[in-house]
Amino acid sequence: MILPIVKYGNPILNRVANPVVSFDEELAELSKSMVETMYDASGVGLAAPQVGVLTRLMVVDSTGGEKNDSLIVLVNPKIITIEGDQFEEEGCLSIPSFSERVHRPKKVVVSARGIDNEELVIEGEDLLSRILIHEIDHLNGVLFIDHLSVIKRDIIKRKIRKKVRNGEW
Ligand code: NI
């Protein structure tokens, strides 16, 4: 089921999501719907708060669905190590039509559980590193614009307020 994506301005995007405790059918259904929603929106990652659910669940596919085996579903993810730096253009399905370059670690190692509570260790480099950290940020109520300078962030916020006023948001 394709779910509506919550946009910037909804306070759920600023809240810390709760750890998953039961790996049940409801969680499996939610992850399936999130995968569908991500692909439908041509995204490369989606975190549960973006569909209005305050749960530490996220889905990632750095190929946007081009490759069959590149989908990763992560539950209760934790960053284990980070290394290096990259500074690339980044956007967010919750902040459509805006993008900015953001500093991120070049490499990351993330530990998590899979949808059946199996242990996962994911190593990400470049784009995958950026997506993993961006989505984990969402679980902590942090958006990519929070990493920008105050000036750049305020410009985006002002443009969004204008869109809200015009009924375009
Ligand atoms: Ni995002």
Image (tube, rainbow, N blue to C red):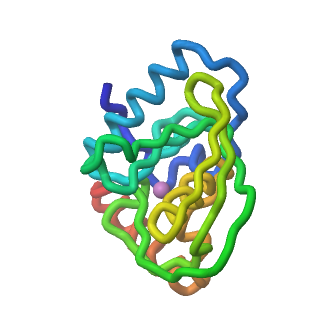
Q: Is residue 157 left or right of residue 159?
A: right
Horizontal and vertical percent position of residue 118:
64, 28
Q: In this view, does 123 lie to the left or right of 60?
A: right
**Residue drawn at point x = 37 percent, y = 70 percent:** 98
Horizontal and vertical percent position of residue 73:
50, 38
* Image vertical order of residue 40 relative to residue 83, above or below: above
**Residue drawn at point x = 32 percent, y = 25 percent:** 1
Can see residue 55?
no
Q: Quadrant of residue 75?
A: top right
* Nearer to me, 89 or 161: 89
* Nearer to me, 111 or 4: 111
Return the residue found at the far top: 25
Horizontal and vertical percent position of residue 16:
70, 45
Quadrant of the image containing the C terminus: bottom left
Can see residue 96?
yes
Q: Is residue 97 left or right of residue 15?
A: left
Horizontal and vertical percent position of residue 165:
35, 61
* Image vertical order of residue 26 relative to residue 104, above or below: above
